[in-house]
Amino acid sequence: MKLKVYADRMSQPCRAVIIFCKVNGIDYEEIKVHISKGQHLTPEFAEINPMKQLPAIADGRFKLFESHAILIYLACAFPGVADHWYPADVFKRSKIHSVLDWHHSNLRRGAAPYVFNTTIAPILGRPLNPQVAAEAEIILSSSLSKLESFWLKGNGRFLLGRNQPSIADLSLVCELMQLECFPLTYTTPVLDEKDRTRLLGPHKKVQQWIENTRNATSPHFDEVHRVIMLAKERQQHQRLKAAKNEGGSNMKRPLVSRM
Amino acid sequence: MKLKLYADRMSQPVRAVIIFCKKNGIDFEEIRVDIAKRQHLTTEYAEINPMKQLPAIVDGRFKLFESHAILVYLASSFPGVADHWYPADVFKRSKIHSVLDWHHSNLRRGPTTIVRNTVLAPVLGRPLNPEAAAEGEKFLSASLSKIESIWLKGNGRFLLGGNQPSIADLSLVCDIMQLELLGETERNRFLGPYKEVQQWIENTRNATNPHFDEVHKILMKAREKLQNLRLKGANNEGGESDMKRTLHSRI
Ligand SMILES: N[C@@H](CCC(=O)N[C@@H](CS)C(=O)NCC(=O)O)C(=O)O
Ligand SMILES: N[C@@H](CCC(=O)N[C@@H](CS)C(=O)NCC(=O)O)C(=O)O
């Protein structure tokens, strides 16, 4: 039976898992679960993941959720995954665990609530919370600095000074790609690249590393990210239109269309 | 060279690592880094862990931080650690990763947040923050209910239906133990509804004793101190209002 991947490509950990499968030639069936339609909250999906979150997999009778755990499982259980993704060497492997653990309470804790409270919330019919966004931005900025100064220290092209990508590169870069999708923020009306530039601009190594990871997983990286690029374009379009209608007046609240 | 463990036993991930070493006969040197004295913020310690957090280990020239990663490393590289702590079987191992990943963004955001914004705040010279504490309570309640209904489902004595503890049991139980600092009434208010959780804490404690109790001793002492502080505070207030009353009656 083919591996089943339950996914919504708007979600960053889902994209990491899908790209990983594609790059490594793992045959899988993608089962779309649309978060914006509440499909992850159904009793059927709770059978797959009782925590009602994405991604999740079912490999035969074996079910698993949490994207890091899934990536490790896939790297271990499928033959043909190159060692650099999740090295057998216990020292190298431990460092990758360390980055992945750090991701949870730092980069993810910053990026996810930041993007949610500047962009995504209205799509899901929830209010934007500027205070939460402001707190998240602090964590996000400090995480980006740590990436630049510590995890990307040295001359390697990837995290931990490595020259080939690991599951940690994929997981963290997909998280950062989420920043692509917020041309709309609660403070700035028609500003597309400004926030991204403000946040990522000072971090040259981070930018280069995103590019390196993208290249190393091409063409799948772009293909799997197409959905957020399209969402971004749609939002930009909406904003321009709205700005025109209001004569460019200062909109405090973004107008987000149904996606 | 002996394994070095940078530790402050007031920290729950630190306790998990210490108990793990003791239980598995891993020889280590405990290097105290007192968070209350801000010793984790020194430049020397940043050489060990640039994130300036505890725990961290140094094994020869190999440095590592993040308690889950440390537990996995120790279980993988020290001979004599029984398989049940971190099974070689890829399916069992993956489930343990899943629990540990889940821990980060759920349970971990409960006890610490509550403790820091209630009983510990005055000690650390910070204002009480009931809003943050309430947020922590939300994470705690939701997490305990998931542990009870999902992770402890079935008849096993440990997480995932296991009959022997894994690093996940140790990590999560040490986290919940932080609630002891709130005093018995508060702790029971949170844990009361979750019978399976209570039993599992007891099982994990028994499976790792006497080390579990020994390593938690500092927490119990801190609980007493905090309680005394609270009593004194209450008395002082009482004293003050007594004084006011006397003043009033004079007038
Ligand atoms: N730590 C988890 C995070 C999973 C997660 O937060 N998934 C989000 C999408 S990015 C989700 O399912 N959100 C829907 C919800 O929580 O209701 C992982 O890495 O898999
Ligand atoms: N995810 C980390 C958490 C580490 C952590 O939060 N450590 C705390 C003590 S429990 C600390 O060092 N706090 C001091 C600080 O952050 O300034 C782990 O499991 O090791």
Image: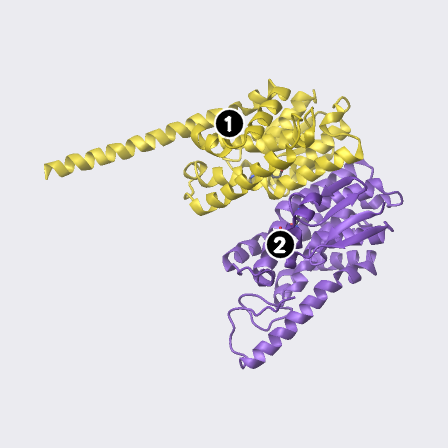
Chain colours: A purple, B yellow
The C terminus of chain B - image quarter: top left
Furthest residue to the front?
Answer: A43
Q: Position of residue B24 (x, y in %)?
A: 70, 21
In this picture, is B6 found above or below A198?
above
Q: Nearer the viewer, mark 1 or mark 2?
A: 2
> How far, Cα to Cα, is label 1 from label 2?
34 Å
Q: Which mark is residue A129?
A: none
Could you tell whether B240 is left or right of B70 in the image? left
Q: Amino acid at mark 1?
A: Leu
For the point 76% across and 21% down, the residue is: B80
Q: Say which residue label 2 marks.
A: A112
Residue bearing mark 1: B219
Q: Pointer 2 indicates a residue of which chain?
A: A
Location of the N terminus of chain B by quadrant is: top right
Q: Quadrant of residue A8?
A: bottom right
**Disc 1 element:** helix
Q: Is residue A227 above or below residue A41?
A: below
* Residue at mark 2: C-beta within 8 A of ligand 1: yes
Question: Could you say which is closer to the camera, residue B51 or residue B44?
Answer: B51
Badge 2 density bin: few <14, some 14–19, many ≥20, Cα 10 Å: many
The residue most toward the top is B210
Between B71 and A221, the residue placed more toward the observer is A221
Q: Height in image: B203 above or below A132? A: above
Residue B240: give x, y in percent of width and height.
24, 35
Taking the image as drawn, is residue B169 in sight? yes
**Left or right, A65 with reference to B214:** right
Residue B178 shown left or right of residue A5 in the figure: left
Q: Amino acid at mark 2?
A: Ala
In x, y percent, where is residue A184? 60, 67
Q: How many marks?
A: 2
Q: Residue furthest right?
A: A80
Percent position (x, y) of residue A159?
A: 75, 49
